[in-house]
């Protein structure tokens, strides 16, 4: 059971598709709190009913959060513990909740995380793109001009890029990504994560763009788009001595020979063993060398 004290704000992550992902701690928190602040009380009501939870709900969404934040802080000060939830995943991560958390913290109220599902992290874990450093961008602008401008600004970002996208805009966004990043940039699309029809599409941006046009399922459900970072920017950021974590030309020489005969990942792994470089550094260097002009 939760070791509850009155007046705490609990930020509770809820399933993004599979009800089995609701943690025991999250369930106990929702049951024992005096109030649940929910993005959509009807949606959360289905979750609560599935677990036999009868805690009172209060609607808190994008259109009323600023006003509700003050009300919730007053309840917290009065000794009521409140659980904050969104429709799916972790509150305040491209979902309502930030204003409430900020107001509670400013009021000196204890804010407690009850962590769990997050679509961005779930997609990263299975997207097969570098995860050691990533940049979460949330939803791209809906308007094409603003979206293209934002992608242009991100073209030199060295970290893996993580976007949320709606199914009716994913094809257009992939087209814009091709224009901004180049058609050979590696990418993944994770659709309906944790749900019955979870699907992961991996390939170049061009391949994924073509797939989005030919596969109707590609354009259905909740979508996370992952785009590999700019290999040249990553190399430049690490400085001139960054070739393979300080292993200089030896790693490049090994990679060039191995990449001529083997798939990139296998070549990087063997080059790391030969030069005693780290696996992730060898892989990044291999990506960089692959993209260099012949």
Image (cartoon, grey):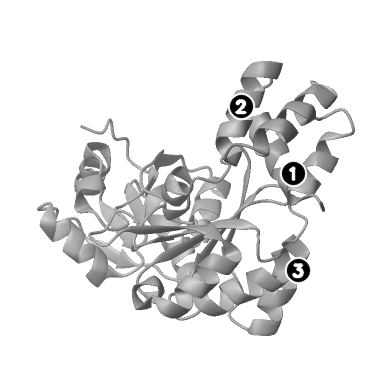
Q: Quadrant of residue 246?
A: top right
Under circle 1, the secondary element is: helix
Badge 3 density bin: few <14, some 14–19, many ≥20, Cα 10 Å: some
Which of 125 and 146 lies nearest the eye of the viewer? 125
Under circle 2, the secondary element is: helix
Q: Is residue 86 visible?
A: yes
Residue shown at the point (68%, 51%) measured from the top left: 229
In the image, residue 95 sits, relative to residue 30, either above or below, namely below
Q: Which residue is mark 1?
A: 288
Q: Is residue 244 visible?
A: no
Q: CA distance from mark 2 to mark 3?
A: 30 Å
Residue shown at the point (27%, 43%) measured from the top left: 26
Q: Which residue is mark 3?
A: 152
User: In the figure, is residue 65 to the left or right of 58?
Assistant: right
Q: Which residue is mark 2?
A: 279
User: Which residue occupies the extreme right position in the image?
Assistant: 240
In the image, residue 44 sits, relative to residue 255, either above or below, namely below
Which of 131 and 269 lies nearest the eye of the viewer? 269
Q: Position of residue 5 (x, y in %)?
A: 32, 35
Q: Quadrant of residue 75?
A: bottom left
Q: CA distance from mark 1 to mark 3?
A: 20 Å
Under circle 3, the secondary element is: helix
Q: Position of residue 14 (x, y in %)?
A: 31, 52
The first of marks 1 and 3 along the sequence is 3
Which of 239 and 252 lies nearest the eye of the viewer? 252
Q: CA distance from mark 1 to mark 2?
A: 14 Å
Q: Nearer the viewer, mark 2 or mark 3?
A: 2
Q: Position of residue 140 (x, y in %)?
A: 60, 70
Badge 1 density bin: few <14, some 14–19, many ≥20, Cα 10 Å: some
Which of 239 and 263 lies nearest the eye of the viewer? 263
In the image, residue 151 sits, relative to residue 202, either above or below, namely below
User: In the figure, is residue 75 to the left or right of 108?
Assistant: left
């Amino acid at each position: 059971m939760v070791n509850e004290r009155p007046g705490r704000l609990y930020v509770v992550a809820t399933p993004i598709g599979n009800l089995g992902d609701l943690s025991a701690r999250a369930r106990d928190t929702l049951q024992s709190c005096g109030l649940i602040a929910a993005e959509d009380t009807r949606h959360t009501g289905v979750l609560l009913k599935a677990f036999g939870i009868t805690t009172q709900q209060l609607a808190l969404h994008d259109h009323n959060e600023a006003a509700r934040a003050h009300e919730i802080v007053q309840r917290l000060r009065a000794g009521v513990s409140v659980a904050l939830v969104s429709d799916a995943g972790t509150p305040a991560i491209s979902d309502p909740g930030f204003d409430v958390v900020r107001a509670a913290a400013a009021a000196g109220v204890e804010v407690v995380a009850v962590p769990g599902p997050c679509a961005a992290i779930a997609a990263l874990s299975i997207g097969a793109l570098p995860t050691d450093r990533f940049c979460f961008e949330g939803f791209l602008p809906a308007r094409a001009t603003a979206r293209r401008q934002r992608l242009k600004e991100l073209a030199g970002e060295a970290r893996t890029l993580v976007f949320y996208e709606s199914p009716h805009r994913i094809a257009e966004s992939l087209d814009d990504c091709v224009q901004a990043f180049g058609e050979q940039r590696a990418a993944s699309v994770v659709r309906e994560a944790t749900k019955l029809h979870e699907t992961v599409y991996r390939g170049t941006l061009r391949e994924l763009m073509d797939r989005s046009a030919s596969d109707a399922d590609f354009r259905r459900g909740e979508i996370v788009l992952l785009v590999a970072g700019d290999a040249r920017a990553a190399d430049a950021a690490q400085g001139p001595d960054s070739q393979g974590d300080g292993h200089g030309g030896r790693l490049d020489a090994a990679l060039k020979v191995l990449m001529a005969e083997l798939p990139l990942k296998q070549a990087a792994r063997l080059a790391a063993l030969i030069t005693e470089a780290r696996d992730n550094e060898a892989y990044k260097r291999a990506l960089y060398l692959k993209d260099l002009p012949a």
